[in-house]
Image (spheres, helix red, strand yellow):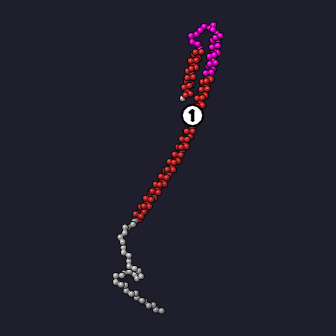
Amino acid sequence: MTLEVKELPPLPEGNSHAPGRGPPLPLKSRKLITKELATEPDRQLQKLRKECIRLRQKIDHLEGEKSEKEVQIQDLLSQNESYRLELVEQKRLVGRVAETITLAFRDFQEITDQNHKRHVHSPPSQASPTADIYIAYEEMVSTWSDSSRE
């Protein structure tokens, strides 16, 4: 068995490409793309995503603080209303005490006047004890009335 070697026909002049392929494509001048330039938009995108996450966390934190403060405000408003109602009740009770004292003083005054009429024969004094008690009573009622208005 012998092998025959066939020779290929010679290439035409000016044609240096391999047979069966077309002429080579012309080379165009292009900018050199480096890894640095290719990843710069990716870095910016990553930076913006991190900033977005940070801002969302900050918003969540601030909204949490806002809701806590709203709850605290509602608690304080409720507490303020209960204090206001207690104050109204205390003023009402002070008024009842003042009214009771007034009635007791009138009863005392009537009894004193009746006793005074019975003891007409006693020598008149310059200031009656009833007048002193009445002045003290007026001062006391005035003080309580002022405190109940506040």
Residue 120 lies, with reference to residue 35, above or below; the image says: above
Q: Which residue is mark 1?
A: 84
Left or right: 100 in relation to 52: right
Looking at the image, how many numbered discs can be counted on the residues? 1
Residue 97 lies, with reference to residue 9, above or below; the image says: above
Predominant SS along the magenta part = helix
Label 1 Cα crowd, 10 Å radius (few <14 / some 14-19 / many 20+): few
> Quadrant location of residue 10?
bottom left
> Quadrant location of residue 105?
top right
Answer whether residue 124 is magenta in the image.
yes
Outermost residue to the left: 13
Answer whether residue 140 is magenta in the image.
no
The magenta span reads 102-129
SS of the residue under disc 1? helix
Quick one: quadrant of the C terminus? top right
Residue 119 lies, with reference to residue 40, above or below; the image says: above
Outermost residue to the bottom: 1
Residue 84 lies, with reference to residue 119, above or below; the image says: below
Q: Give me the residue at 62% from left, 21% from top.
A: 103
The spot of residue 25 in percent (x, y) is: 38, 76
The spot of residue 119 in percent (x, y) is: 64, 9
The spot of residue 137 in percent (x, y) is: 58, 20
Q: Give me the residue at 36% from left, 81% from top.
A: 16
Task: Give the amino acid at mark 1.
Answer: Arg
Q: Give me the residue at 47% from left, 54% from top.
A: 52
The spot of residue 126 in percent (x, y) is: 56, 10
Out of 41 and 142, give the one closest to the viewer: 142
Q: Give me the residue at 37% from left, 69% from top.
A: 30
